[in-house]
Image (cartoon, grey):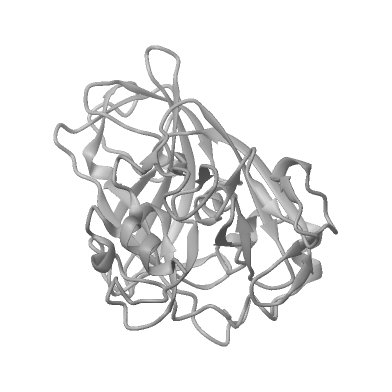
Amino acid sequence: MTFSRPAPPQSVPVYRAAHFKATDGANMGDTLSFASELLLDDVYELKYLSDLHRLSILTPAPGKFKIAPDTEIGTAGATLHLDCALTFMTPDGQTSDAILLVEVDTDGNAEDIFVVPLSGYTSSLEYRLVGIDTTSAHQKFAQVACVSFTRGTHITMASGEQRVIEDLQIGDRILTRDDGVQAIRWIGHSTVRAVGDFAPICISAGTLNNDHDLIVSPDHRLFIYQREDRLGAGRSELLVKVRHLVNGDTVRIQDGGFVDYFQLLFDGHQIIYAEGIAAESMLIDSRTKAVLPQELSDAMGDIIPGHSDLPHAGLDVSEPLLDRPDAAELLRKASMR
């Protein structure tokens, strides 16, 4: 896929694979490694006091990953290989998923291995390896990057009607902020455990002048038009990741159970209205394209106008500006008429 502007880096929390050690099984004493070296039924434990680190990733081409300059772990500029997706089971029968990423040096040798937890992990539990998947790892990794709305979210139609997202159909006409009325090209749906990076975030009614709670995936970006620059961003139009607004009160993580996620795709990246809040639709790039059905992916081709030239590039607010408990309240006041 060719981009006229580079896609922005995306960050994922990771553990070092060396912090997962086999305590029982054929590989007892070894740490997590490549899929070809792993064996089912081996039991692993996470090293005590192991910390999550932020790995920042660039996707220069489909299936290609590099470590971005602003990363907290790994070597900036190094190539990342997506090795596999893993499934573990705890003694109480709960499953925990993870993705294995391998940092490769200039000679093609493995420099480090990272574990992207798709569920919560703790050092007090044993994790039995029950699944090693090398075929759908790219799709699972793409799902982490997809912005999603949850079941029950009201979307503003072209007519002004508020319709719940699960009742939408391909071809339905939706009101967008920048391009008027646009038809839905594709609707994605998945049900996942609401843990780790898959746990949704709830923006309580009234927090951003919304009439009802808005519950979305953590990396979902909201569009805010500031009538007064209370945040100090230096511009009126902003894109803000929901995870950067979490304050444990009016914006909180809903961890536990399962969540139904829906993705809305248009011919271009759009700002639509969900529970009255301006929020982005699905953005196709070299990472998220993997979630599309193969026939749709092929039909869209390598260059997708409206997605490939990133029409909303440059509006993202950096996390340090939002690192304050009253960030959501400041944005609410800044956007009020």
63 or 151, nearer to the observer: 151
Picture residue at 44% right of the left edge, 81% below the top: 314
Side of 44 relative to 132 (left or right): left
For the view shown, which residue lies furthest in the right direction? 171
Q: Vertical placement of 327 versus 194: above or below?
A: below
209 or 271, nearer to the observer: 209
Please state the horizontal and vertical placement of residue 199, each as a whole percent of the image. Answer: 44, 39
336 or 289, nearer to the observer: 336
- Quadrant where the image shows the N terminus: bottom right
Picture residue at 59% right of the left edge, 48% below the top: 149
Q: Vertical placement of 151 versus 113: above or below?
A: above
Please state the horizontal and vertical placement of residue 72, each as a whole percent of the image. Answer: 23, 62
Residue 9 visible: yes
Please state the horizontal and vertical placement of residue 113, each as a whole percent of the image. Answer: 31, 52
Side of 307 relative to 74 (left or right): right
Please state the horizontal and vertical placement of residue 159, each as a whole percent of the image. Answer: 80, 60
